[in-house]
Image (cartoon, grey):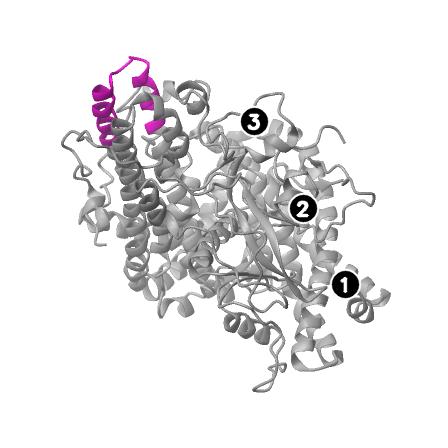
Amino acid sequence: MGDVVSTHLDDARRQHISEKTKKILTEFLQFYEDQYGVALFNSMRHEIEGTGAPQAQLLWRKVPLDERIIFSGNLFQYQEDSKKWRNRFSLVPHNYGLVLYENKVAYERQVPPRSVINSAGYKILTSVDQYLELVGNSLPGTTPKSGSAPILKCPTQFPLILWHPYARHYYFCMMTEAEQDKWQAVLQDCVRHCNNGIPEDSKVEGPAFTDAIRMYRQSKELYGTWEMLCGNEVQILSNLVMEELGPELKAELAPRLKGKPQERQRQWIQISDAVYRIVYEQAKSQFEVVLAKLQLARPAMEAVIRTDMDQVITSKEHLASKIRAFILPKAEVCVRNHVQPYISSILEALMVPTSQGFTEVRDVFFKEVTDMNLNVINEGGIDKLGEYMEKLSQLAYHPLKMQSCYEKMEPLRLDGLQQRFDVSSTSVFKQRAQIHMREQMDNAVYTFETLLHQQLGKGPTKEELCKSIQRILERVLKKYDYDSSSVRKRFFREALLQITIPFLLKKLAPTCKSELPRFQELIFEDFARFILVENTYEEVVLQTVMKDILQAVKEAAVQRKHNLYRDSVVLHNSDPNLHLLAEGSPIDWGEEYGGSGGGSGDSSSPSARVPEAATISEKRRRTKQVVSVVQDEEAGLPLEAGSEPMSPTSLDGVTELRGLLAQNLRAESPPLAAPLLNGAPVQESPQPVALPQASSPPASPLRQLPPGKAVDLEPPKPSDQETGEQVSSPGGRPSIHTTTEDSAGVQTEF
């Protein structure tokens, strides 16, 4: 790889890349500085004026579930340096970075991982043909002749490939289709989480950055959704630079690549990855400098806003009235002729899969709580409750159990509308809805936890506990129905705006954009950092279509289409004491009710809590785990010379595991916890106790839908960029691996 990269990326070309990157970043960062003041003003105004959004009925988890492993197991990875497939121990910690170790022993002995993959911007491919098509499209003219060896051969029929348009690719394979399905669900969860890299609670930096991205791309006549707006700020900036720099380099270097078509493809992937890393480091450096400068200036800006808030608002409203008078006639005609006729079609396309997904969330939550209730009543009551609740608390983060909810969004299509409104991909809407599903599931689970914990303080008997669980479940489901309706309506409004506003701006640009500079004189110089003509113009355009969007969503709710609550149905303070319960310390079910902690991954003591005096290796080994699939580490691939065929030992899903446990089959458990139904093994009981009548959810709108110091104890966090291969220090004992994070949340490895 080094020879290929050094040959085509000599000092002169690297200098050119650096200069081009600096030019693009400098231009963008000016947009970012402009948007920072506007976002700061909007944030402070919002704090003062508040919002009219409906009050959420469910609680939200203020302290996230840390120190959990989402998934772990062995999978085969293709090593590009040796051109061989190797069995790797892999795990996904709670921060969703895929961590690859040489083997499980290396993990337990704290040997640094071979790589940590941040999957933002990646696509998960399940066939080599899909991959070859994308690779061929990325470098035209390199399609291999029929019968020639492809760029990649997979030794099994079950590959998983991580493909990125600019960064390096990763190749994995599994022995069975069941394993492939499980890992695909897990890796898709990683992509979904890492794509959402800008923190939701960032009320200034986040909106300023995304608005700057939009403004910069519109200045280049690029309207509509952008598929590579994924990851954290530095990753997005790197994608922004590569969007412009990549085609230029490809046109220059592609004719110079030598060898067969598949060899030229391989060379281009290596060159693109090397350029991406160069761009990434430069983007990180320049962005951090500008961000530090803005944060230093923020206190002075806040002081001006607090002092002159009323004057700034008055000035902005005056500017908006002048712009409105200028563009309103043109905008209304454009909306009436080009947008209004399609709003209902877009809304219908969004509503069907989204509402089905939220219905599935409700059903999965109901089933898990009901199954847990059966386990409690049949297996000793409160003695096992801690173990079961420990597992239930992680339901929203269980990739396999949530998969049935997420996949409801896959059929989303905007047939005929995508081209009209310049929507490059529906993936942005799918992932946004899926994130909402996970949040609502966790809110429902956390609310259930809180109410049940309160009830347990009364010392109920087994029968009383069973009835209480059913009552609390019904209570939480009613709250979920209301909140999910509010979340879906907000999602529909935002999606419709995201689709139609760029289209309107593009339509109006030829007649309106050139006239905007003349409105600049209406802004007082003292307020110029908080009021921008371009932003005010966009707000006016938004207002022209917003009434049609609100009306469409309102009509859908009035007709009870897809079971949305009407806007007139408002539940204020329906449970005033509930939010007070959430102010206490996080509930530790294993400590309070599990006796021995529940949910550990230690095979010799499944419920043991990690003692303070335990070794680091032991703590790592016992890290709590949401779900685990572990293969035989000694197995080999069918096409590896001298290897025996692998006999997969992983269980084929939670359903099969339930059957095995019900038959009292005991298999050797791995050190990391295997998946349990609702966190509890299902055992046969000679005289099962029946639950009270209420075995199905109560009637609700959604039910009618059609079908350097101490070593870090945590697994490594996903860095902003994949760390690559790491080599242990010579001499037998590995070097100590620690991680720190700087103020921007960027991981540094020592």
**Which secondary structure lies at badge 1?**
helix
Magenta region includes residue 450: yes
Residue type for callout 3: Arg
Q: Position of residue 733 (x, y in %)?
A: 78, 39
In the image, residue 346 above or below residue 54: below
Q: Which mark is residue 127?
A: none
**Front position in the image: 336 or 183:** 183
Q: Position of residue 441 (x, y in %)?
A: 36, 39
Q: Identify residue for label 3.
A: 306
Q: CA distance from mark 1 to mark 2?
A: 31 Å
Q: Identify residue for label 1.
A: 17
In the image, residue 684 above or below residue 552: above
Q: Nearer the viewer, mark 1 or mark 2?
A: 2
Q: Identify residue for label 2.
A: 113
**Front position in the image: 48 or 140:** 140
Q: Nearer the viewer, mark 3 or mark 1?
A: 1
**Which secondary structure lies at badge 3?**
helix
Say whether disc 1 or disc 2 marks the residue closer to the N-terminus: 1
Residue type for callout 1: Ile
Question: Which class describes the residues within 10 Å of circle 2: few (<14), some (14-19), or many (20+)?
Answer: many
Segment tinted magenta in the rendering: 448-475
Q: CA distance from mark 2 to mark 3?
A: 49 Å
Relative to 551, is 677 on the left or the right? right
Task: Tell me the quarter of the picture where residue 328 sits.
Answer: bottom left
Q: Position of residue 332 (x, y in %)?
A: 36, 59
In the image, residue 591 above or below residue 172: above
